[in-house]
């Protein structure tokens, strides 16, 4: 269990800073050459020189601003991961496929308000439907034990869930079902946010988590 920052491609701020720094150096060389090669009999107008110096100052300030913004973004990413360190080992409720290893999986179905029947639909990692099970019309936790439509145990693997809500046998809608999964790792996602890693390498943005509880 660890918090691991990931190496990412150069950020937009880094690329922007490099471009501005390059322009800054080019401007400095051009200004120096202009001063060195000006006609002694017709020197550079003082007002033009002042404008160029102001431009020089503005470019320098932009470089420093970009450096500060990049540093702040990096610090925010580290702070976010530090704050989420306590999540590791806990169960997060999130809409992700779950890695099934034979142990029951706790689901959090959410039937439509007017539903009088709820059907849990299970699909494998290829998106194929492997089970349809009528479950209680309740928003409380539901234990899924990995049984298919024929009553046989499903093999270990990754499964996703959705819930179909019915009223008078009319379909009201189908929605994804959140699962409780143990957080194994937290990684920076390269944009200042944090990506959580669950069993089987399943990942989700930390902002997708709707609830958190201690693992049983």
Image: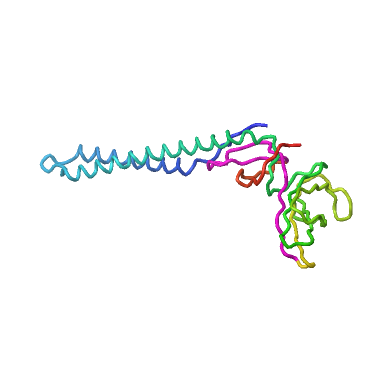
* Image position of 87 with respect to 164: above or below: above
The residue closer to the viewer here, 209 or 11, is 209
Q: For residue 207, which quarter of the picture?
A: top right
Where does the image place residue 14, in percent across and percent down from the top left?
45, 40
Q: Residue at x 75, y 65 (%)?
A: 171
The residue closer to the viewer here, 100 or 110, is 110
> For this view, does 57 lie left or right of residue 66?
left
The count of marks equals: 0
Where does the image place residue 160, in percent across and percent down from the top left?
74, 51
Q: Residue at x 68, y 47 (%)?
A: 94
Q: Is residue 176 magenta?
A: yes
Residue lying at the far top in this picture: please name it. 2
Q: Quadrant of the N terminus?
A: top right
Stretch of the chain drawn in magenta? 171-199
Residue lying at the far right in this picture: please name it. 151
Where does the image place residue 156, in percent across and percent down from the top left?
81, 44
Q: Residue at x 40, y 43 (%)?
A: 19
Where does the image place residue 121, in percent across and percent down from the top left?
78, 56
Applied colour scheme: rainbow
Q: Is residue 163 magenta?
A: no
Q: Residue at x 71, y 49 (%)?
A: 178
Q: For residue 193, which quarter of the picture?
A: top right
> For this view, does 23 lie left or right of residue 125?
left
The residue closer to the viewer here, 113 or 100, is 113
The residue closer to the viewer here, 31 or 135, is 135
**Magenta span dominant secondary structure:** strand
Q: Quadrant of the C terminus?
A: top right
């Amino acid at each position: 269990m660890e918090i691991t920052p990931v190496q990412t491609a150069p950020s937009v701020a880094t690329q922007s800073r490099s471009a501005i720094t390059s322009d800054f150096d080019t401007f400095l060389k051009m200004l120096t050459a202009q001063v060195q090669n000006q006609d002694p009999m017709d020197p550079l107008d003082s007002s033009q020189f002042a404008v160029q110096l102001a431009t020089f100052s503005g470019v320098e300030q932009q470089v420093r601003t970009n450096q500060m913004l990049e540093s702040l973004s990096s610090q925010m990413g580290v702070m976010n991961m530090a704050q989420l360190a306590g999540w590791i080992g806990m169960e997060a409720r999130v809409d992700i496929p779950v890695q099934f290893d034979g142990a029951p999986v706790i689901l959090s179905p959410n039937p439509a308000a007017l539903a009088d029947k709820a059907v849990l639909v299970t699909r494998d990692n290829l998106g194929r439907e492997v089970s349809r099970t009528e479950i209680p019309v309740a928003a409380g936790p539901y234990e899924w034990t990995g049984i298919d439509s024929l009553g046989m145990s499903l093999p270990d693997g990754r499964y996703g869930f959705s819930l179909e809500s019915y009223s008078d046998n009319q379909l009201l809608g189908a929605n994804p079902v959140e699962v409780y999964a143990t957080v194994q790792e937290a990684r920076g996602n390269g944009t200042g946010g944090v990506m959580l890693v669950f069993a089987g390498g399943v990942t989700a943005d930390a902002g997708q988590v709707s609830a958190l509880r201690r693992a049983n």
